[in-house]
Image (cartoon, rainbow, N blue to C red):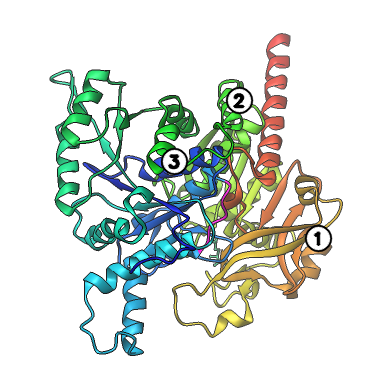
Amino acid sequence: MRRSDSRSKSKFIFVTGGVVSSLGKGIASATIGCLLESHGLRVANQKFDPYINVDPGTMSPFQHGEVYVTDDGAETDLDLGHYERFTGATLSRLNNVTTGQIYYEVIQKERRGEYLGKTVQVVPHITDEIKGRVYKLAAQGYDVVITEIGGTVGDIEGLPFLEAIRQVPYDVGRENVLYIHLTLVPFIRAAAELKTKPTQHSVMHLREIGIQPDVLLCRTEQRFSDEIAAKIAMFCNVDSDCVFQAWDVDEIYRIPLVYHEQGLDRVLLRLLKLESPAGQADLSGWRRFSEQLDSREDTVHIGFVGKYVDLQDAYKSVYEALRHAGVANGVNVRIHRIEAEDVDAESLDEQLDHMDGVLVPGGFGSRGIEGKIAAAGHARRAKIPYFGICLGLQIAVIEFSRNVCGLTGANSTEFDQQSPHPVIDLMAEQKSIQAMGGTMRLGAYDCVVREGTRAAEAYGRPVIRERHRHRYEVNNKYLHQLAEHGLVISGVNEQTNLVEMIELRDHPWFVGCQFHPEFKSKPLAPHPLFVKFIAAAKARHLSHRRSREFHSERS
Ligand code: GLN
């Protein structure tokens, strides 16, 4: 499968991982994109996921963590979130490929007779399909495509992907391909030594598959000496300046600087025979961000009322967006994860009153719903800044309907199909849908922001575009009653006439949005709604501190 001339303009980087999972391959790949982009190159990050699901949209957060949504409505792996946060690229469904998608496509081609009577096999048909996904992305006009292969070397599921990337140099020329391997150099406490053997074995395994890595990125708890780096280089057959260290850092957003200081971007350009269009890396934004991280003073406390709060990754983009907004406001954001099922009327004061803000994120299913409703009600009455995202907006509307409009039993039909007041309901076109995968309202839609609202103040422009992932909507039959009692509809989709944003007057900051703003927040471009939410939380924090100081001076 020789590539045509138009595609051979691109360079290809493949990132594999070894020894153990959770080494941060996604962040390493995103950082490679960031560094190359800082030289003025057009880059696209791509993720291969060896599981059989077509996409993670049908997986439980317990299995998969967050589902990251792109502008074009693809439900993708959370590593795409890292890619978008570390680079300027806007990703699409081309950027996440699963085994499920590859087989689905190959089987459909076979049914259409496109293989002309051949026996359809993993090699070459599955591997060709995999390579085709890389070349298709490159054909969008990128200088460099960086493809991360999920899992670790040695996983059975990953083999077709590794075989496919092994073949790529035969299509595009070896000088256009780079293999990067992320590995672990563990520190064994009992021996007080760093061990290189796992890395040697991992590279040996890759070589058995036919891939010789060009660059090694070594995760390590502590920096290692040049001797150790030289030993790794020698035994793994890589150039002596191609072993890089990724020591533990307090903040992931410092990682581009850590690699740049070791010269990773220069080595990548040299190996790929690429000129730096800008002449040198411009990482001034990342440097500034790193300085801002150090100059944060106060800490604001956010009560995060969700269902998967024990999982590190379930609300990844929301946690990141809160941190970006914290830096923008010069404060640390401490997230207090509150299990929605544990919230009840009696414990509300205790759980929420010392919070500077309350956030209810997206979610599905009825578990923990009443706890979230109670939390939104408390934030409304106690005038604690509240930010409701997707389900968090629906929760705020249910609470307002019940307790301000007097609509007893108001609910979403997702949780109570017999509710006398279905203030949140399925859209007409959703009612007939049976299949679960990829059938929600997904991707970017326009929203018109109403003048004079908190939403308008945050965005500073009349039309915004944000990403969605939900089935249920505010029921327009109740709009009149909600508005009469003071709920402000601050954003609408004018094509579909659907509510996109709500807020309250006479409250420091109470905003809900039906979309997911967290997917568009970046460290160097924090999302305005998060920035304003944290600003309101900071104001509450400072006024409480002032009043504490005042009282202690008087006593
Ligand atoms: N379960 C709600 C719906 O489907 C909210 C979804 C979400 O928060 N992402 O509309």
Q: Amino acid at mark 2?
A: Gln
Question: Whole-Å distance between the Cαs marked 2 and 1?
Answer: 42 Å
Quadrant the N terminus occupies: bottom left
CB of mark 2 near ligand 1 (< 8 Å): no
Mark found first going from the N terminus, 2 or 1:
2
Circle 3 Cα neighbour tier, 10 Å, few/some/many (<14 / 14–19 / ≥20): many
Can residue 348 be seen at all in this image of the molecule?
no
Q: Is residue 89 magenta?
A: yes
In the picture of the structure, the residue carrying the numbered disc 2 is 292
Q: Amino acid at mark 3?
A: Ile
In the picture of the structure, the residue carrying the numbered disc 1 is 485
Mark found first going from the N terminus, 1 or 3:
3
- Image coordinates for residue 203, horizontal then vertical, percent: 19, 42
Magenta extent: 88-92
Question: Whole-Å distance between the Cαs marked 1 and 3?
Answer: 52 Å
Residue 35 vertical placement versus 374 (above, below)? above
Q: Is residue 102 magenta?
A: no
Report the side of 347 relative to 20 (left or right). Answer: right
Tell me if label 3 and label 2 are in contact, CB under 8 Å: no
Residue 158 vertical placement versus 215 (above, below)? below
Circle 1 Cα neighbour tier, 10 Å, few/some/many (<14 / 14–19 / ≥20): few
- Residue 32 numbered tag: 3
